[in-house]
């Protein structure tokens, strides 16, 4: 009987707590959204599974000696987000942005949501149960860039205790781009503006595509060294692709490497969805602020495009401003879709890719600014 009692006390049923059950349910919800709804499945599936594993009682997955404990070291050291950035860089084409450099302003304008949310997070301290430090507010604000790896990187440096909530919010809103952005885009533009057809982009030479990432790296290193890790890995991946001399390395960065790191990154983020780390009042604040940040970023990009269209010698469709958030390429596809609704002959995808790529650079620069000011 003593042995049976010891066996019973070692089971998960005996040791499970209510909060653990809730967080396992959250993990299964993320799995449902990834598998059934197709919301960012590459990240939400391993994150959801990691959440389930981290809340299994007695298993010790997140304790020293557990696999999730050691995997999280890749995030803590900043390795996983940087490797993801290298893969994204290898898959990115700077051509549309270089063909129309004005779109850099749209990528910059969309980052306004990040800095607006920084003050919003601090303002939430007036709400009972909310208590965000400046570092935590800066980590939350980066959600507005709709850039998952950057959000994870900044959170791991400034507020690792909020990493799970920030990562889930960032990737959830990235997945909800097709639902969140269209109402904002339609509200801020007229039917006539949405019908604007843009001129065909010029052909960008190979030399331009090779020189640009090198120039970007040098400027970042000289002006904002704290952003150099993110921008540097992004430029390395892009240079491998643009140069055409290391095709094997470029393909590895785009496929095998980024896929392996994505699995590890997702499980590591899921390890931070333990009951004691996630079930807090602050989590609701983070989720709410994430929605506000993303909406402000979308709106500021559209408004900047409207202003630029007034002073530009060539027409600019304001819809492409919404692609200034760095949800590549979903935001560009949404801009193209809304444009086609108003004008079946209006193909904005390549034009929207310009601000979309600029948004990736902008979010990395914004992250560097926050890391420099808040540390």
Image (cartoon, helix red, strand yellow):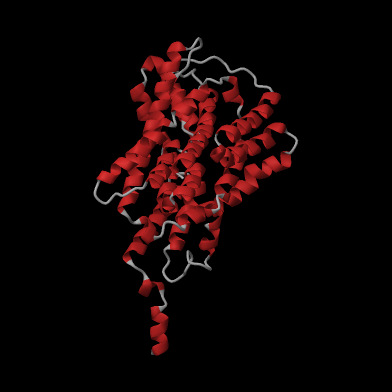
Residue at the outermost left position: 128
Query: For residue 101, what is the image quadrant?
Result: top right
In the image, is residue 306 above or below residue 141? above
In the displayed structure, would residue 246 be above or below residue 190? below
Q: In the image, what residue occupies the spot 44% across and 29% down?
A: 110
Q: Would you identify the image quadrant in which residue 278 lies?
A: bottom left
The residue shown at (40%, 16%) is 193
Left or right: 240 as drawn, with respect to 280: right
Q: Is residue 133 left or right of residue 238?
A: left
Q: Is residue 352 visible?
A: no
The one of 261 and 122 positioned closer to us in this rendering:
122
Q: Position of residue 285 (x, y in %)?
A: 32, 46
Determine the residue positioned at 51% across, 21% down.
Answer: 347
Residue 236: where, in percent of width, then height? 65, 38
Percent x, y of residue 323: 47, 29
Against 20, residue 241 (above or below) is above
> Residue 18's x, y, as percent?
32, 65
How many tags in the picture? 0
């Amino acid at each position: 009987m003593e042995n049976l009692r010891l066996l019973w006390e070692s089971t998960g049923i005996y040791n499970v707590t209510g909060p653990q059950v809730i967080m396992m349910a959250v993990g299964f919800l993320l799995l449902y959204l990834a598998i059934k709804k197709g919301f960012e499945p590459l990240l939400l599936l391993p994150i959801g599974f990691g959440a389930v594993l981290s809340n299994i009682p007695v298993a010790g997955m997140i304790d020293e000696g557990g696999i999730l404990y050691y995997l999280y070291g890749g995030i803590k050291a900043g390795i996983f987000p940087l490797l993801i950035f290298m893969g994204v860089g290898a898959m990115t084409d700077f051509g549309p942005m270089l063909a129309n450099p004005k779109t850099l302003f749209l990528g910059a304008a969309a980052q306004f949501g990040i800095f607006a949310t920084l003050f919003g997070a601090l303002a939430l301290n007036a709400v009972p149960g909310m208590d965000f430090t400046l570092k935590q507010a800066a980590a939350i604000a980066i959600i507005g860039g709709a850039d998952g790896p950057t959000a994870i990187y900044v959170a791991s440096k400034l507020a690792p205790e909020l990493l799970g909530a920030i990562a889930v919010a960032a990737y959830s809103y990235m997945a909800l781009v097709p639902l969140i952005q269209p109402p904002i885009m339609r509200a801020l533009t007229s039917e006539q503006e949405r019908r604007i057809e843009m001129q065909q982009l010029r052909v960008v030479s190979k030399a331009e595509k090779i020189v640009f990432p090198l120039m970007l790296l040098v400027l970042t290193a000289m002006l904002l060294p704290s952003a150099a890790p993110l921008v540097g890995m992004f430029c390395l991946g892009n240079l491998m692709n643009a140069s055409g001399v290391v095709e094997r390395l470029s393909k590895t960065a785009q496929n095998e490497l980024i896929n392996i790191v994505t699995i590890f990154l997702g499980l590591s983020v899921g390890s931070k969805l333990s009951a004691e780390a996630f079930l807090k009042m602050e989590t609701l604040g983070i989720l709410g602020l994430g929605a506000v940040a993303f909406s402000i970023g979308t709106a500021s990009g559209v408004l900047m495009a409207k202003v630029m269209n007034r002073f530009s010698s060539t027409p600019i469709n304001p819809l492409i401003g919404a692609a200034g958030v760095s949800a590549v390429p979903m935001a560009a596809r949404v801009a193209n879709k809304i444009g086609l609704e108003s004008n079946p002959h209006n193909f904005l995808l390549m034009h929207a890719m310009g601000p979309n790529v600029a948004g990736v650079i902008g979010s990395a620069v914004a992250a560097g600014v926050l890391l420099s000011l808040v540390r």
